[in-house]
Image (cartoon, rainbow, N blue to C red):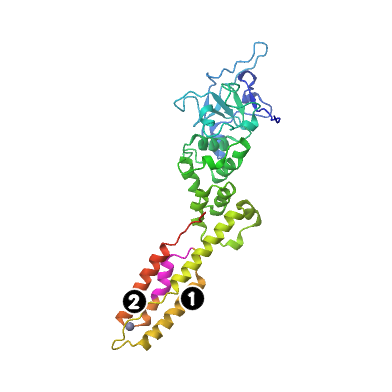
Amino acid sequence: MSWAPDYSFSPSEWEPPAQRENDTIITSDVLQARDTPSMIEQTVTPPFSLNPSPSVHVEQPSFVPVSTAFYPGSHCDASDLVLLSSDSVLFYVHINILLRISENTFSSLLSSPLSGDTYRGSIISIPETSVVLDALLHFLYSESCADQAPSFETLCTAVDQMPFYDIEPRHHIIPSNPSYGYLLAFAPLFPLELYALAAHFDIFHLAASTSSHLLGCSLSTISDEIAERIGAIYLNRLFHLHLRRLTALKGILLRSPYPHPPIPGCSFHSQKQTSRIWALGVAQLAWEATPDTSAHDIESSLSSLDESSTCALCQQSLADWMKAAIASWASIDRMITS
Ligand SMILES: [Zn+2]
């Protein structure tokens, strides 16, 4: 059995945050100002007795910061474990929920499994700030972290740190998890960073949903660092998505409008001239096209070509072509495929 540092300590060993060297009680105002979820100051109360041993007198602090999401009574069942963040905020949690998906959760921090009775009712020190621990716990509890409004950077840190606590991100960052939607909401703002996060941990559905926001990204500008984090497989999927859409768009644009039978005022020859003008306009659009070219871009680029013919049948044919082209383009997949 490999040695692992034990980050836990019993309630009798717990040194109140206010009495630690270089430590201070953090008020809710200060915490909020540091992008910290709002905390309540709460008197230390059972179920966790913090009374020191009779031989050592430790003066208890009047208040300690407690998470507003994970406090005593925050959930139906009574908590049976307390996690202490690096900035001395207490999180009252439930062992059965932490171990719901994997029994190895936090095992790297502990000398024996969390599933045993060793840590029931004790306090485990977690080397994460309260905002990161809060986000991490919301994913483990499958609850929305929207009320705490963590930043994108905080969420990324929480996910990146999951493996350190023997938590598999793929098992928790799933569409049915309410915090998943909160994380995905950052896709329009940080598409490349979120795609890299999802790709790094092989969270396909998150990467796929985010990839639709990368259609306007110039792939040549991706840095080596981000490319390495994304990895070969997901980078390949992103390149294929761009290539697939560009090829599909060019195929759609290069279909010529159908000619109509010659009528007085519009012969085959005049239709050929109209087609030539149309082809030049389409070639220009195809040259400038990108994977995120919109239907509006197609419409506005080619609408002026309607004036290339005064024939009502030619104009109708062009209008039908435009309608079919936009419908075809809208049906092309906007996300990576596995
Ligand atoms: Zn015509």
Ligand 1: does it lie within 8 Å of the C-beta at label 2? Answer: yes
Residue closer to the observer: 201 or 265: 201
Which three-letter amino acid code belongs to the residue tagged 1?
Answer: Gln
Task: Please provide percent x and percent y for residue 197.
Answer: 57, 48
Q: What element carries label 2?
A: helix
Q: Is mark 1 on a helix, strand or loop?
A: helix
Q: What stretch is highlighted in magenta?
A: 292-303
Q: How many labels does the image show?
A: 2
Tell me if label 1 and label 2 are in contact, CB under 8 Å: no
Q: Name the residue under label 2.
A: 317
Q: How far apart are marks 1 and 2 (CA)?
A: 20 Å
* Residue at x 63%, y 15% (from the top left corner): 52
Q: Is residue 225 left or right of residue 315?
A: right
Q: Residue furthest right?
A: 3
* Residue at x 29%, y 86% (from the top left corner): 263
Q: Which numbered mark, 1 or 2, is in the foreground of this view? A: 2
